[in-house]
Amino acid sequence: MNSPGQPGNGDQPPSNHRRRPRYTGTHPKRFQQKYKEHDIAAHPELRDRLRAKGKTPSSTHVPVLTEEVMACLTPAPGEVVVDCTVGYGGHAAEFMKRTGPTGKLIALDVDNAELERTRHRLSQENVPVSFYRSNFAGIAKVLNKEAIDGYDIIFADLGVSSMQIDNPDRGMSYKHEGPLDMRMDDRLRQTGADLLNTLSEQQLAEAFWELADEPDHREIARLIVTQRAVQPITRTSQLVNLIFSVKGLTPGIWRQQRRSSGSGSLHPAARTFQALRILVNDEFGSLRELLRVAPYCLRAGGRIGIISFHSGEDRLVRQSFRDGISNGIYRSAAKDAIVPQMREINSNPRSASAKLRWAVLG
Ligand SMILES: C[S@@+](CC[C@H](N)C(=O)[O-])C[C@H]1O[C@@H](n2cnc3c(N)ncnc32)[C@H](O)[C@@H]1O
């Protein structure tokens, strides 16, 4: 477990002292054992060592395309920026440096636990900032609460944070054994397990195909429905094993295949997990609503920038900005998506599929 509240802990709100976890071997392997990484502000040498290897310390997130975001959106002193997906606050901190004490950052996230940690960290800066536990589909309501006439910048960095994907209790990754929860917002009523155990075979197959292009979508949906009649599917490992069996693989054969085809090959369960997570969190629905209301929430000359990691999301953003140009809503927009340079991908492999698009209100 982490050790919140210990001296030097800049990342965690204070709480009771907990005993340090024991582990065998020289390095902790399990998420819960990585107590130094959970308190990374107190262990800068470990952060530097992990980052030099292209790794993201547990309980942190490395922001992507930061320089490019700042260059496109040009935050200036006195401006109001809404960071729709504040996460660990990496982009937010860069915005705050530029908007300064006369500007304002409005930080949104649906994940309350991470929002509280980030609130603690960012509130130490000398820049006005307010936090909302809110879906970014509600940016217009936030504007009313703030009693301002519009944002100068709307920014969203879609998808999940490293803190969420690396925490086995969130059930978002095929790499970790845990409950199939997958909710970014724990107020949502249905978890990944709930959907797997209640949707029809056809609904599941459609989701795996439409949200993640899973080629074996029909077979995976069929086996889920057969297996759940015997025993509910509630753990990540159950779903991973089921997918391996549909694909006629074992973890050993997969590792061999991966070695011979290169480390870039996708894990057999990656697409199904991605589709289920998108479904649980209605990620496309929220993005559509954000894109619809954004122009009404921007001041004249205001800028919007969105980073996506999924071709379906990038398509929605591109189309919305194109339509905005044709309708005269946006004055200009990115012609092509901006992608990370090789040096960023090497230092943070999780940035590899990021695409940034921007537009400027007319
Ligand atoms: C990729 S991370 C953002 C990382 C952040 N830019 C940083 O520098 O740390 C995405 C974050 O968006 C949040 N999120 C995803 N969908 C959301 C939505 N519809 N409304 C608000 N927050 C959302 C997630 O909970 C997660 O914390």
Image (cartoon, rainbow, N blue to C red):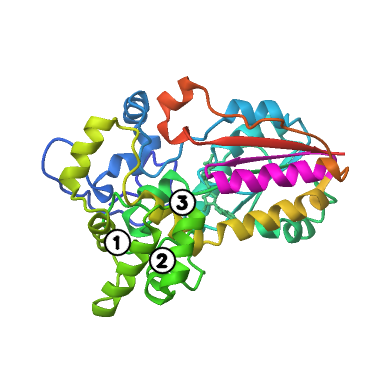
Relative to 11, does residue 64 appear above or below in the rendering?
A: above
Whether residue 152 appears in this view of the structure is: no
The amino acid sitting under disc 1 is: Leu
Look at the numbered disc 2 and give the secondary structure of its residue: helix
Q: List x then y, in percent, for residue 277.
A: 45, 58
**Is residue 313 highlighted in magenta?**
yes
Q: Decide if ligand 1 comes within 8 Å of the CB at mark 3.
A: no
Residue 213: mark: 3
Q: Residues within 10 Å of mark 3 (few under 14, many from 20)?
A: some
Q: List x then y, in percent, for residue 214.
A: 41, 53
Q: Which residue is mark 1?
A: 239
Residue 228 image-quadrant placement: bottom left
- Magenta region, residue range: 299-324
Q: Are marks 3 and 2 in contact (CB under 8 Å)?
A: no
Look at the numbered disc 3 and give the secondary structure of its residue: loop
Question: From the viewer's perspective, is 53 left or right of 63?
Answer: left
